[in-house]
């Protein structure tokens, strides 16, 4: 979550008149994150979140995502849900940008400890089991194919991380087919610690499904492992990595093909996030954010370091997927 577009309570009031959630009282920006604009607001009936989509591809997710999240909730998964207005519509507009209203979920962002990681891993496995068979209309946004398209639009071709990206064989289009032969379903695609909420030592909710879509479950696991199992500078956290993997596989054991594919999938996940971070660097250089409530672009070098970790056969042997 982040803030790119400034909003006031006056901006939001006309939107809230279409909902039966009481009178607006306050509006607070949420600075964490990198992609969309988010505000927490309070009304006379409770607390909610307004998300303003800065990317058209994420706004397009609203054609199916609210129904999918309701499906997960009905399956016992505590995930963010969007509110329809009094006409049944989930989508609103502020200017030309799509916005949605969701319930505010209580809890604090996940901590990169072995205990939190193990519980988060189990939660991701349960989400995969619950979503298996759901007919998502789109591939997930972290899919290598999508990020290769993003990469072609980058202008920072001399950046060391750009060169590292294209030197990795797992990133090439010709090497994507193996992923498509693994068990698939709707994947979260952004299961990072700041999207997993904890309360009292347990997972209280999962938020930010804006990149979700159909892909291999093992690729979603790989994406999560690259986030949870390393610190912000890209240094490996062995106990946290193992905790997440243990939590996941205790609930949903990997098939032999999935386990064999994990090293390549982890490298591919690193490349996907490096691409996104390079894109964010370019946006930041163009001034496409609000300085007051934005944490700034996250360095792609941290994922370059992760990629190097997964390129080392000694490390892969020690991980013992």
Image: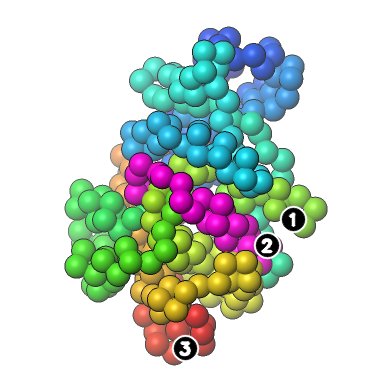
3D distance between C-alphas at marks 1 and 2: 7 Å
Residue 153 x, y percent position in the rendering = 20, 48
**Is residue 62 visible from the viewing direction of this image?**
yes
The residue drawn where x is 62% and y is 40% is 74
Range of the magenta residues? 116-141
In the displayed structure, 320 sits above or below 199; it is below
Q: Mark 1 or 2 closer to N-term?
A: 2
Q: Secondary structure at mark 2?
A: helix
The residue drawn where x is 28% and y is 51% is 146
In the displayed structure, does residue 78 sit left or right of residue 165?
right
User: Which residue lies under the disc numbered 2?
Assistant: 119
Q: Mark 3 or 1 closer to N-term?
A: 1
> Which residue appears farthest toward the front when viewing the image?
133
User: Which residue lies under the disc numbered 1?
Assistant: 202
Q: Are marks 1 and 2 in contact (CB under 8 Å)?
A: yes
User: Which residue lies under the disc numbered 3?
Assistant: 317
In the displayed structure, does residue 54 sit left or right of residue 27?
left
Dividing the picture into quarters, in which one does residue 61 lie?
top left
Residue 170 x, y percent position in the rendering = 28, 71
């Amino acid at each position: 979550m982040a803030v790119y577009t400034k909003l006031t309570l006056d901006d939001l009031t006309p939107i809230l008149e279409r909902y039966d959630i009481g009178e607006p009282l306050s509006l607070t920006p949420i600075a964490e994150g990198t992609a969309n604009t988010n505000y927490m607001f309070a009304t006379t009936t409770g607390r909610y979140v307004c998300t303003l989509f800065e990317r058209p591809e994420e706004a397009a997710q609203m054609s199916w995502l609210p129904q999918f999240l309701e499906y997960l909730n009905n399956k016992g998964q505590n995930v963010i849900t969007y509110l329809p207005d009094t006409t049944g519509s989930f989508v609103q507009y502020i200017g030309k940008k799509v916005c949605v209203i969701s319930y505010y979920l209580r809890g604090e962002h996940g901590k990169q400890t072995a205990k939190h990681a193990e519980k988060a891993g189990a939660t991701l496995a349960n989400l995969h089991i619950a979503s298996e068979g759901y007919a998502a209309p789109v591939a997930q946004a972290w899919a290598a194919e999508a990020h290769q398209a993003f990469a072609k639009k980058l202008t920072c071709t001399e950046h060391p991380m750009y060169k590292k990206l294209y030197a990795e064989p797992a990133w090439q289009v010709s090497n994507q087919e193996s992923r498509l032969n693994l068990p698939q379903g709707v994947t979260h695609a952004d299961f990072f610690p700041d999207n997993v909420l904890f309360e009292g030592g347990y997972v209280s909710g999962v938020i930010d499904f804006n990149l979700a879509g159909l892909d291999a479950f093992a690729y979603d696991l790989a994406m999560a492992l690259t986030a949870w199992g390393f610190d912000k500078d890209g240094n490996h956290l062995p106990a946290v990595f193992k905790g997440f993997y243990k939590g996941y596989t205790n609930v949903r054991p990997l098939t032999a093909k999935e386990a064999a594919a994990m090293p390549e999938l982890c490298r591919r996940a690193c490349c996907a996030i490096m691409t996104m971070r390079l894109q964010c660097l370019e946006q930041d250089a163009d001034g496409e954010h609000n300085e007051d409530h934005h944490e700034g672009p996250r360095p792609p070098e941290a994922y370059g370091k992760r990629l190097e970790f997964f390129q080392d056969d000694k490390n892969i042997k020690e991980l013992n997927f």
